[in-house]
Amino acid sequence: MEPPSGPASRRHVPWSRLLLAGTNVWSLVQALGFKQDQTSPCPHEACALWGGRHTRREMESVLAGSLLNFWTPPTATQLTVETVPPLAAEGSDVLLLAHNVTKNTLGYAWQRGERVDNAQLIASYRVDTNATTNGPAYSRRETLYPNGTLLIRNVTQRDTGSYTLLVTKNDLQTEIQTGHLHVHPVLPSPVITSNNSNPREHEDTVVLTCGSETQNTSYMWWINSQSLPKSTRLELSKDKRTLTVVAVTRNDTGPYVCEARNPVSVSRSDPFTLDVLSPVAKPSLQASNTAVTEHEGPVILTCLADETGVSIRWFFKGQSLLLAERMTLSSDKSTLTIDPVSREDTGDYQCEAFNRGNSSRSDPLRLRVTWRENSRALGVGAITGIVIGVLLVLTLLAVLGHLIFLHRGNWPPASTSGRGPSGSSVS
């Protein structure tokens, strides 16, 4: 910030603000740091500007004139202090401009607060030597210019408060004026937070909060890029920082945007959308065939849900379905295919539609699987072969039985040689 070239305007301040505590001359001398001895060093910064050592009598004489001057009615050229800018953003530079400063000036002194306190001295400047002396309250960010204006760089909220200027004239008269500095933070983009990330429709109440709480900040809300509509279900807190949505519906999803504003900055949040969980309607289950023969197929079961944005899961005999190798699900899990069908597939099937807050299950659908015993009808050739085989076996058994019988049975007796029938011989 460039140093000011001179007074920019004339302003008037009530004369009562120029009066210091104390009603007699010596009380003011003591306030400036003098002791009871005749010649004492003046520890107060304003006294130092006057030359260092003065006797009590000299100081009484000079200060008596000063006090009389204090009680003189104000003129149009009264000393004033202007803060530029009047509302400062944190991190900016601020000027405390001194207006209507007298030409016959011995020096200036700036201090924190409204009371004269050497411990709060920031800096003093002596005109005849062009010398600046820093005080206990100096923070290396202040610059005191020859015209009495004070520059404060990179202000923080801790700099907020009163600043007092003491102007000492060549006749040792002193003028005092106080200015005020207000430093406000530059607001970051607020973030909308919710007490319930997945509210259930018609059941839950949601409280939305706009950023963190800061002083001197006002708030505004928008929904669907429009100002908040009048509704008994929409309630704003006193400072408008929180928005309450009573018994949310699927029409309250948003998006919501809030704005934070203070005297030096304005900031808006990113859009925030509510994920309202609607009740899930009961799905229905259909099958391509409910009565099939084992090893045949396929059988296709389809789950029909009315809502979008729901997920599907399957149950068999009341338990979560464990997929066999013969079973496949579609990408959205709404279709179950069984191919081929096995007798183990007989039973009740159900599908369930669900979201993050609600679910609903279909009625059971029974699949019946029939099967034959493991036997097959014999062909004519097989039967013929079996018959021939049986006959051959029977024939073989008959021949074998006959041979055995012949071997064990009685045979006819053999004839005797040399013997003939009995009779007489012929001579």
Image: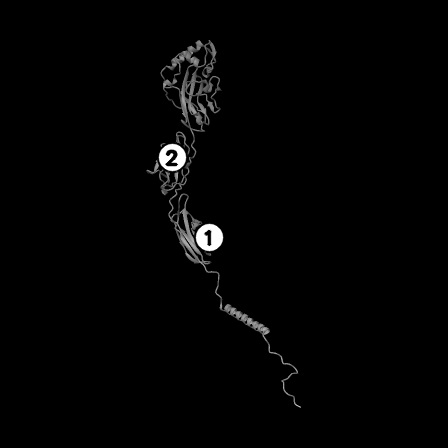
Indicate the quadrant where residue 111 lies. Answer: top left
Q: Secondary structure at mark 1?
A: strand
Of residues 105 and 164, the one nearer the viewer is 164
Most extreme residue toward the bottom is 427
Most extreme residue toward the front is 424
**Colour scheme shown:** one colour
x and y, in percent, of residue 12 in the image: 37, 21
Residue that badge 1 annotates? 328
Q: Residue at the location (35% across, 36% down)?
A: 235
Q: Amino acid at mark 2?
A: Thr
Please tell me whether mark 1 or mark 2 is closer to you in this view. 1
Indicate the quadrant where residue 252 lies. Answer: top left
Q: Secondary structure at mark 2?
A: strand
Q: Earlier in the sequence, mark 1 or mark 2?
A: 2
Label 1: few (<14), some (14–19) or many (≥20) C-alpha neighbours in 10 Å: some
Kindly identify which numbered label has been placed on residue 242: 2
x and y, in percent, of residue 100 in the image: 40, 20
x and y, in percent, of residue 256 in the image: 39, 39
Q: Amino acid at mark 1?
A: Thr
x and y, in percent, of residue 340 in the image: 47, 56
Of residues 164 and 410, the one nearer the viewer is 410
Q: Is residue 343 above or below residue 81?
A: below
